[in-house]
Image: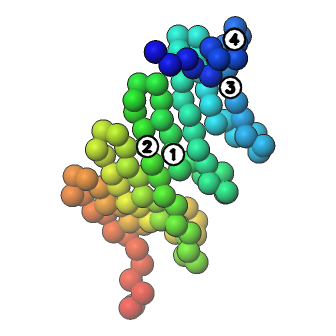
Amino acid sequence: MEKTIAQQLNVKDFPFIIKDKNGKEIYYERSDRYWLKTERDEDGEIIYRENSDEWWLKKKFVKNDNGFEVYYQDSDGFWSNREYDENENCVYNENIFGVIEDNRPNKNK
C-alpha cells in the first residue's frame, strides 16, 4: 500500500492540511488515512478532486460576457452541464438523467 503524504512526512498532528499560495485548501488528510486532493484553476475554481476512496470529479469552467458555464463529471458516471448569468443564477441545467431546465432569456424577443 502506497504511503499517504502525511505518512511520508511523518506527520502526527491531524487533520493535515496543505494550502496553495492563495490560502485555498488543496490537500486534506485524516489520521485514518482518508485524504482529499483538490486542483484549482487560475481563478481559484475547483476543477478536479479525488479522494482515497477512488472517487473523483472534474469540472470545466467557461467564462463569457453573460456569465459562465460549468461542466461536471464524476467517477459515479454522473454529469451535468450548467450555464449561469452574470448574477451567478443558474439559467440552464442539463444532466445524465435527461432533465433539461432552460431559463435563459430569449434573445429574439
Of residues 97 and 23, the one nearer the viewer is 23
Judged from the image, the secondary structure of the residue bearing numbered disc 3 is strand
Residue denoted by label 2: 57
- How far apart, in angstroms, are the residues tagged by discs 2 and 3? 20 Å
Instruction: Mark 4 and mark 1 in contact? Answer it, CB < 8 Å.
Output: no
- How far apart, in angstroms, are the residues tagged by discs 4 and 2? 29 Å
Q: Quick check: 13 above or below 88?
A: above
Extreme residue in the top direction: 12
Instruction: Mark 2 and mark 1 in contact? Answer it, CB < 8 Å.
Output: yes
Q: Is residue 23 left or right of residue 54?
A: right
Residue 17, numbered circle: 3
Residue 3, numbered circle: none
- How far across and how far down the image is residue 97, in percent? 22, 52
Q: Along the polypeptide, which appears first: circle 2 or circle 3?
A: 3
Judged from the image, the secondary structure of the residue bearing numbered disc 4 is loop
Judged from the image, the secondary structure of the residue bearing numbered disc 2 is strand
Residue 10, numbered circle: 4
- How far apart, in angstroms, are the residues tagged by discs 3 and 1? 17 Å
Q: Along the polypeptide, which appears first: circle 2 or circle 1?
A: 1
Residue 90 at least partly seen: no
- How far apart, in angstroms, are the residues tagged by discs 4 and 1? 26 Å
Please name the residue shown 27% across and 62% down the image.
100
Binning the other alpha carbons within 10 Å of mark 2 as few (below 14), some (14 to 19) or many (20 upward) gives some
Q: Along the polypeptide, which appears first: circle 4 or circle 2?
A: 4
Of the residues shown, which amino acid type is indicated by label 3?
Ile
Judged from the image, the secondary structure of the residue bearing numbered disc 1 is strand
- How far across and how far down the image is residue 34, in percent? 51, 19
Q: Is residue 8 left or right of residue 102?
A: right
